[in-house]
Amino acid sequence: MRKGTLTPPSSRPPSKPDGRPRPPAAAEIGGPWLWGRHAVLAALANPERKLLRLVATEDNEAELRALGPTPAPQIVSKDELQRLLPPGAVHQGLALIAKPLKPLGIEDVLERLGERRDAIVVALDQVTDPHNIGAVLRSAAAFGAAALVVPDRNAPDVSGTLAKAASGALEIVPLVRVVNLNRALDQLKKSQFWTVGLDGEADRTLASHKLAGRVCLVLGSEGEGLRRLTREACDLMARLPTAGPVASLNVSNAAAIALYELVRDGPSRDGTA
């Protein structure tokens, strides 16, 4: 495995002093940087990923050699790797450029579900923080959700920040971007999904609805919550039983608690008992 010095894209000149072209930046190669141990190792293990460039520090060299990934990693120092990534990126000695995953639609998710009677989908309405979306993906993977649905116009692009927060779940739970969220909810309802909006002012708790079968949890942004039209598109509204002076939850925390509530007394949603 070769070692080398990396220069961040923003400071690279158009060509090297010897006239040879500079190494391409991530966007020019074909995708954003992914960083962090779980995010990178999950992407390396995903056969759906086309891997383009792998960079690692020496303390990860032996493990990567055992895995035998293609492309072979370029081994650099921690400081060199840090300079290559956005400021503040916690890379844990691993970074990867890979082609984005093939986008999926609601139809693809429903086809994958087939005849399964128990399934969960999570939908986010105008949640824009990539950390929150990544954390919701992580909870969705932990509790066996079939997909995370976000509106295309008001959700961030998949980035290293989002993938790091997802801790590998980006490779497990499809992130479905839709042009119209309400139309997507209608498609799910036609496929026997209950669509349940979470709202702190709802009359009933999520547990009191005793939901089973196919369920789509719909969560809004922390500031404004669900938009009016999104609320109207839901079959039911529900709240989590919070109380006290700080009764509201971060959207990712609310998603995790709601997902747990849906699965705690029933079969797992991956089809196992």
Image (tube, rainbow, N blue to C red):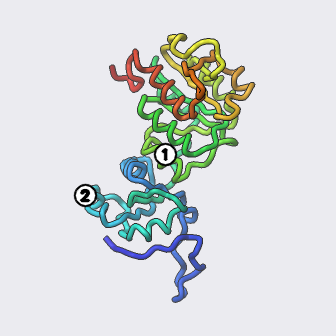
- Label 1, residues with CA under 10 Å away: few <14, some 14-19, many ≥20: many
Q: Is residue 10 visible?
A: yes
Q: Taking 71 as reference, is 170 left or right?
A: right
Circle 2 packing at 10 Å, graded few (<14), some (14-19), many (20+), is: few
Residue 84 vs residue 2: left or right? right
Of the image marks 2 and 1, the number of the one nearer the N terminus: 2
Q: Amino acid at mark 2?
A: Ala
Figure check: 89 above or below 25: above
Spot occupied by residue 152 in the image (x, y as percentages of width and height):
66, 41
The amino acid type found where label 1 is placed reads Ala
Q: Quadrant of the C terminus?
A: top left
Q: Position of residue 200 (x, y in %)?
A: 63, 22
What separation in Å lies between label 2 and label 1 (alpha carbons)? 26 Å
Q: Residue furthest bottom?
A: 18
Q: Nearer the viewer, mark 2 or mark 1?
A: 1
Q: Which one is nearer the viewer's eye here, 102 or 204?
A: 204
Q: Residue furthest right?
A: 228
The foreground one among 259 and 105 is: 259
User: From what the image shows, is residue 257 above or below residue 22?
Assistant: above
Q: Secondary structure at mark 1?
A: helix
Vertical order, 184 against 167 (above or below): above
Q: Which mark is residue 66?
A: 2
Secondary element at tag 2: helix
Residue found at the far front of this picture: 245
Instruction: Mark yes or no: residue 235 visible.
Output: no
- Residue for badge 1: 165
Residue at image position (43%, 45%) is 167
Name the image quarter holding residue 10: bottom right
Q: Residue at x 54, y 57 (%)?
A: 32
Which of 40/79 is in front?
79
Classify 65 as above or below 261: below
